[in-house]
Image: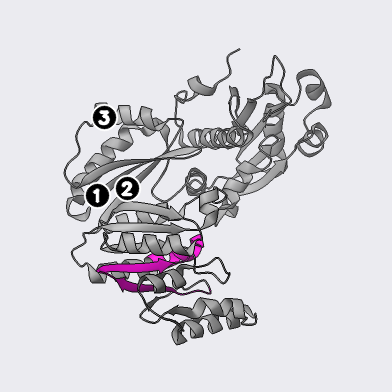
C-alpha cells in the first residue's frame, strides 16, 4: 500500500514550528506494518494545497493530510479538498453537533469562527476527534483515500489510535501487526551504536528491521518486528540489550527520568535534587512523570551563592575559597539536600552554562556534578561544549544516570566519562 503525507502550515515552512506530527504518524502506522513513501509540506496557500492534493492522490492509495482544520482564515484544508474533488462545501450536521457539545463542555459560546470548522465537503465522512473542536474527515479522491487530521499534536495522537488506525485496518485487512521494541541510550551517538551493532549482529532475520532516532539527551534504538516473527525478534532484542547495556537508560515507552523513578520506587527509595546551572531542569524531568511524588521529595534551585548557603548549608568559606563551580561546593550541596529533605539519594549540579562567565581555569561548559547518599558522595567535573540548552540537558542527564547507576549497583566508570570528563 502506497501512503503519502501532506503536512500543511506556513509555520512549518518558516521553521517556527517543528514538524513532530509526521514522526507521530509514521510511528503509529508502523505499528500495523505500514510505511510512508513520501511526505510533502506546504504553506497556507489554497492553490498549492489543491495542486498537491491532486498530484498526491493520483499516486497514493492513502493520503493523510495534517493541519488546516482550525477556525481561522488560514485554515484551508476543507476548502482545498472540496476544490480538488470538485465538491461543494456544506455545513455538516454531525460536525456541528460535535462542536456544540465541545462548547458546552468548556462552557464557552459557539461563535462564527468556530462554526467554520463544521463546513466540509459534502461527500466527506467524519473522523472522530475526542479532544478538539474540529472533527477530522475523509473523502475519496481519484482512487485514493484522503484522511484529514488536525495539526494540534495531542488531538492528532488521539485520532490516530481512535479513528485512523481502525479505518485503515478495516479497509486494508491484510496489514500485519508490527511490534516495536525500543531502547533509549545515553552517552553514545548513532554512528557508534551502529558500528557496535554491525560488528556483533551483522544480519537480522526477515521481518525484523533495525532503526534509530537521534535525540537529546538520548538516542533511540528500535526493532520493528512483524508479529509472525516476534519470538525470534525477542531473542535478538536480548542480544541487543546485552551489547548496549552500559548505555541503556530506559526501555519501551519510558524516558530516563521515568525509568529511574520506577527503579527507586521498586526499592522504596527517595530522591532530592540541588540545582544551580540547570535551574530546576532535573526536578522538572522527574516531576512531569505522573506518580513522581512516591520518589521525589524536594528540589532546591540555588542559583546564587547566598541561596546555596541559606537553603543547603553550603559554607561561605567554601564558596569564597573554591567558588560555586567546584567539587567542594557540589559535595556540600548533596549533603545539604540529603539533610534537609530526608531523601535516600541526592544529586547536585553547579556549572557555567554560558555563553559568558567562563575563565581560564573554569571555561564555559564546566560543570561539577555530585550524587550519593548519607554513606557515600561522589563528585565529577565535566566539560560539555555547545549551546546553553544542550549543556543543561546533558548535565541533567548525567546526574540522573549516576543516580541510576548507584541505585542499581552498576559498577565501573561509564564509557561516556572519557568523552565529557574535564581533564585536569
Q: Are marks 3 and 2 in contact (CB under 8 Å)?
A: no
Q: Secondary structure at mark 3?
A: helix
| Quarter of the figure with residue 308 | top right
| Quarter of the figure with residue 319 | top right
State which quarter of the image contains the C terminus: top right
Q: Are marks 2 and 1 in contact (CB under 8 Å)?
A: yes
How far is the residue under mark 2 from the one under mark 1? Answer: 8 Å
Q: Is residue 305 left or right of residue 31?
A: right
Q: Secondary structure at mark 2?
A: strand
Where 54 falls versus 371 (above or below)? below
In magenta segment, residue 144: yes
State which quarter of the image contains the N terminus: bottom left
Question: What label sits on residue 181 in the rendered view?
Answer: 2
Task: Give coordinates of residue 238: x percent, y percent.
Answer: 28, 40
Residue drawn at x 52%, y 45% as measured from the top left? 257
Part of the protein shown in magenta:
133-160
Question: What label sits on residue 225 in the rendered view?
Answer: 1
Task: Give coordinates of residue 290: x percent, y percent.
Answer: 54, 57
How far is the residue under mark 1 from the one under mark 3? Answer: 18 Å
- Determine which residue is flagged by label 3: 198
Of callouts 3 and 2, the N-terminal one:
2
Q: Secondary structure at mark 1?
A: strand
Q: Nearer the viewer, residue 54 or 240?
A: 54
Q: Nearer the viewer, residue 221 or 403?
A: 221
Where 160 falls versus 122 (above or below)? above
Q: Is residue 318 left or right of residue 76?
A: right
Residue drawn at x 31%, y 50% as measured from the top left? 180
In magenta segment, residue 128: no
Of callouts 1 and 3, the N-terminal one:
3
Q: Nearer the viewer, residue 93 or 291?
A: 93
Amino acid at each position: 500500500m502506497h501512503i503519502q503525507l501532506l503536512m500543511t502550515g506556513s509555520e512549518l515552512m518558516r521553521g517556527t514550528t517543528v514538524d513532530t506530527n509526521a514522526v507521530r504518524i509514521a510511528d503509529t502506522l508502523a505499528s500495523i506494518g505500514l510505511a510512508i513513501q513520501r511526505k510533502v509540506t506546504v504553506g497556507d496557500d489554497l492553490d498549492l494545497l489543491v495542486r498537491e492534493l491532486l498530484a498526491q492522490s493520483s499516486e497514493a492509495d492513502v493520503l493523510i493530510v495534517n493541519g488546516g482544520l482550525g477556525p481561522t482564515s488560514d485554515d484551508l484544508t476543507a476548502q482545498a479538498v472540496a476544490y480538488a474533488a470538485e465538491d461543494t462545501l456544506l455545513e455538516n450536521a454531525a460536525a456541528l453537533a460535535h462542536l456544540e457539545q465541545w462548547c458546552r463542555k468548556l462552557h464557552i459560546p459557539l461563535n462564527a469562527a468556530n462554526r467554520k470548522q463544521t463546513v466540509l465537503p459534502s461527500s466527506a465522512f467524519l473522523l472522530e476527534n475526542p479532544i478538539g473542536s474540529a472533527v477530522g474527515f475523509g473523502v475519496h479522491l481519484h482512487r485514493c483515500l484522503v484522511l484529514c487530521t488536525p495539526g494540534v499534536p495531542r488531538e492528532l495522537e488521539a485520532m490516530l489510535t481512535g479513528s485512523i488506525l481502525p479505518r485503515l485496518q478495516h479497509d486494508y485487512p491484510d496489514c500485519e501487526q508490527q511490534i516495536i521494541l525500543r531502547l533509549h541510550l545515553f552517552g553514545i551517538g548513532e554512528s557508534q551504536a551502529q558500528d557496535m551493532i554491525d560488528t556483533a549482529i551483522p544480519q537480522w532475520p526477515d521481518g525484523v528491521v533495525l532503526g534509530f532516532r537521534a535525540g537529546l539527551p538520548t538516542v533511540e534504538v528500535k526493532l520493528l518486528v512483524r508479529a509472525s516473527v516476534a519470538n525470534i525478534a525477542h531473542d535478538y532484542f536480548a542480544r541487543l540489550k546485552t551489547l548496549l547495556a552500559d548505555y541503556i537508560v530506559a526501555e519501551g515507552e519510558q524516558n530516563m527520568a521515568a525509568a529511574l523513578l520506577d527503579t527507586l520506587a521498586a526499592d522504596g527509595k527517595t530522591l532530592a535534587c540541588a540545582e544551580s546551572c540547570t535551574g530546576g531542569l532535573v526536578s522538572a524531568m522527574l516531576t512531569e512523570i505522573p506518580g513522581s511524588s512516591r520518589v521525589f521529595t524536594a528540589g532546591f534551585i540555588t542559583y546564587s551563592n547566598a541561596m546555596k548557603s541559606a537553603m543547603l548549608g553550603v559554607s561561605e568559606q567554601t564558596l569564597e575559597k573554591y567558588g560555586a563551580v567546584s567539587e567542594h561546593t557540589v559535595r556540600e550541596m548533596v549533603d545539604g539536600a540529603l539533610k534537609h529533605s530526608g531523601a535516600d539519594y541526592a544529586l547536585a549540579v553547579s556549572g557555567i552554562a554560558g555563553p559568558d562567565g567562563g575563565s581560564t581555569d573554569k571555561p564555559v561548559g564546566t560543570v561539577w556534578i555530585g550524587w550519593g547518599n548519607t554513606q557515600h558522595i561522589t563528585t565529577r567535573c565535566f566539560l560539555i561544549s555547545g549551546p546553553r540548552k544542550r549543556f543543561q540537558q546533558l548535565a541533567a542527564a548525567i546526574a540522573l544516570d549516576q543516580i541510576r547507576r548507584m541505585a542499581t549497583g552498576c559498577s565501573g566508570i561509564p564509557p561516556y566519562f572519557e568523552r565529557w570528563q574535564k581533564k585536569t
